[in-house]
C-alpha cells in the first residue's frame, strides 16, 4: 500500500512560527526563511526522497542545512483544527500511518497476546508515566497486540498510546483489550487472546465469549465474580471451578498460588521434561499454554531493544569520559605503590564491567563485585584493601 506522508518544514527565526505556503521557498510574515516540502512516498525509496529534498534546498538557507531542518520539523499544521483532548496531535499523522501499516501488511495467526510496554522517554510530556517494575521505569506507556506463536512471533499488529485516564462505560483494563481487538478487526473470528492479571476478569472473558473470541490469562483472586472458595492446599495441588458457558477458574499452588482464567481449557495436567536433578513434574495445561502464548509482547520488546531511540549526545559522552579519567586518577593517587617503578597500577575493567574480586573469593570464599583490576596482573580486585593485600602476598619473600 502506498504511504502518503506530508511533511511541512519551516526554517524560521522562531521555530514556533508556522506559516504554510505554496511552492518550495519564500519568506513568512516574521521575515524568516521557510521550506514547505510535500513528499509523496508512493513506492519511492528513502534515498530518492532525500535526493528530492537536497535538490529543493532554498538558496537563502546557509550553514548546516540538515540541522536547520530537524530543528523545525513539523508533522502537523499548527493552525489546523484538532481535537482538544489529543495530547499527541503534533505526531498524530505519523502515529496513524504506522498504526495503519502495521494492521494492513500482516494478519496475525490464531494466538495473540496483549500487554503494555514502556517506551523510554526522558523529556517532558503530559502523558509521561512512571512504572517501577519496568526496566526503563519512566516513559510513554503503550498497549500492544502482538502475535505469539510461529515465525511471526513478536510482530506488533496494533498499538495504542496511553494518554491518561481512560474514561468510559467499562474499566480501563477491559477497554484496552476491546479497543485493540476491534481496531484490528479480530472479533467474531475465533482468535485466542492471552492477557496478564491486570486485564483478565470474568466480565471481560464473558464479553469475549459472546464475540466468539477465546481468552486465557492469569487473574487476581479478588476480582469481581471470581469464586471465593478457590484454594489449592499443598504444593502441586489444583483447585478449580467452571461455569455452564465453559469458563474455567483454576488455582495451582507452586511456590505461591497461581490463579488462571480460561475459556478454552479444562483442568488437564501435563508432564514436564525432567529437570537437572532428573525429577519429572506435572503442571496444568492452561499454565503451560499461557506461558507460551504470552511471549509475543516480550519478544517484541526484545527485538525493539536493539534499536535504541534515545542516544547520548557528545556532551554526555565527554562528561562520562571525564568522570572515568577522574576515578582513575584518584585510584592511582590513593593506591600508588611505594616504588614508582612498580608496574602494578589499578585501572578500570574492560567496558567497566563488574567482575568478582579474586582476593575476597580465594581468602574468604565471599563473592564481591568490583570494577578495578591490576593493569599488569589482569586480576580483578577491590580497590581497598584487597589491591594492597594481594600484591603484598605476591611480592612476599
Image: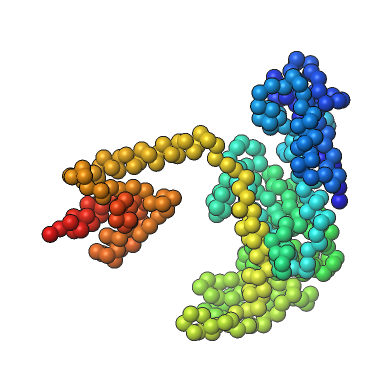
Asked whether 170 or 313 is in front, the reply is 313
Left or right: 299 in relation to 6: left
From this view, report whether residue 329 is shown above or below residue 379. above
Residue 57 location (% of width, % of height): 76, 27
On the image, the x and y values in percent for residue 195 come to 68, 63
334 vs 267: above or below: above
Closer to the camera, 252 or 388?
A: 388
Q: Residue 346: give x, y in percent of width and height.
A: 30, 48
Identify the residue shown where x is 76% and y is 57%: 157
Q: Front-most of 126 and 355? A: 355
Compared to residue 28, the image places residue 391 above or below, namely below
> Is residue 329 shown left or right of residue 131?
left
Q: Name the residue at 79% across, 45% down.
A: 45
Q: How is the image coloured?
A: rainbow
The answer to whether residue 347 shows anywhere in this view is yes
Please name whichever residue, 192 or 121, is drawn nearer the observer in this view of the structure: 121
Quarter of the picture containing the C terminus is bottom left
- Specify the farthest residue to the left: 397
- On screen, 51 above or below 206? above
Left or right, 177 with reference to 212: left
At a point 74% along the width and 47% down the height, the residue shown is 167
Specify whether residue 250 is in view.
Answer: no
- Residue 58, quarter of picture: top right
Residue at 61% x, 53% y: name it. 306
Q: Position of residue 222 (x, y in %)?
A: 62, 64
> How many numbered marks appear?
0
| Residue 389 position by quadrant | bottom left
Amino acid at each position: 500500500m502506498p504511504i502518503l506522508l506530508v511533511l511541512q518544514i519551516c526554517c524560521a527565526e522562531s521555530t514556533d512560527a508556522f506559516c504554510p505556503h505554496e511552492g518550495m521557498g519564500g519568506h513568512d510574515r516574521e521575515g524568516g526563511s521557510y521550506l514547505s516540502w510535500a513528499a509523496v512516498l508512493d513506492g519511492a525509496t528513502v534515498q530518492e526522497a532525500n535526493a528530492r529534498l537536497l535538490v529543493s534546498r532554498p538558496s537563502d538557507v546557509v550553514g548546516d542545512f540538515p540541522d536547520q531542518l530537524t530543528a523545525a520539523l513539523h508533522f502537523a499544521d499548527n493552525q489546523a483544527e484538532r481535537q482538544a483532548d489529543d495530547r499527541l496531535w503534533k505526531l498524530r499523522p505519523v502515529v496513524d500511518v504506522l498504526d495503519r501499516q502495521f494492521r494492513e501488511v500482516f494478519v496475525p495467526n490464531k494466538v495473540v497476546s496483549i500487554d503494555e510496554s514502556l517506551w523510554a522517554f526522558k523529556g517532558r510530556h503530559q502523558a509521561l508515566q512512571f512504572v517501577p517494575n519496568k526496566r526503563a521505569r519512566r516513559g510513554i506507556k503503550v498497549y500492544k497486540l502482538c502475535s505469539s506463536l510461529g515465525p511471526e512471533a513478536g510482530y506488533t499488529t496494533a498499538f495504542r498510546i496511553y494518554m491518561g485516564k481512560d474514561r468510559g462505560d467499562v474499566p480501563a483494563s477491559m477497554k484496552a483489550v476491546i479497543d485493540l481487538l476491534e481496531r484490528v478487526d479480530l472479533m467474531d473470528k475465533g482468535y485466542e487472546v492471552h492477557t496478564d492479571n491486570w486485564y483478565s476478569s470474568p466480565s471481560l472473558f464473558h464479553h469475549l465469549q459472546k464475540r466468539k473470541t477465546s481468552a486465557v490469562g492469569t487473574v487476581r483472586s479478588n476480582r469481581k465474580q471470581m469464586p471465593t472458595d478457590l484454594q489449592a492446599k499443598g504444593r502441586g495441588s489444583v483447585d478449580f471451578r467452571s461455569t455452564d458457558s465453559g469458563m474455567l477458574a483454576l488455582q495451582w499452588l507452586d511456590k505461591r498460588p497461581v490463579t488462571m482464567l480460561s475459556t478454552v481449557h479444562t483442568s488437564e495436567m501435563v508432564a514436564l521434561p525432567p529437570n537437572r536433578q532428573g525429577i519429572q513434574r506435572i503442571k496444568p495445561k492452561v499454565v503451560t499454554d499461557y506461558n507460551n502464548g504470552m511471549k509475543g509482547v516480550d519478544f517484541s520488546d526484545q527485538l525493539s531493544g536493539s534499536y535504541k531511540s534515545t542516544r547520548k549526545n557528545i556532551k554526555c559522552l565527554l562528561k562520562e569520559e571525564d568522570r572515568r579519567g577522574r576515578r582513575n586518577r584518584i585510584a592511582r593517587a590513593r593506591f600508588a605503590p611505594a616504588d614508582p617503578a612498580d608496574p602494578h597500577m589499578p585501572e578500570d575493567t574492560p567496558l567497566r564491567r563488574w567482575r568478582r574480586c579474586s582476593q575476597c573469593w580465594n581468602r574468604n570464599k565471599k563473592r564481591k563485585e568490583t570494577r578495578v583490576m591490576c593493569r599488569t596482573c589482569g586480576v580483578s580486585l577491590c580497590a581497598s584493601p584487597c589491591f594492597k593485600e594481594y600484591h603484598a602476598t605476591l611480592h612476599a619473600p
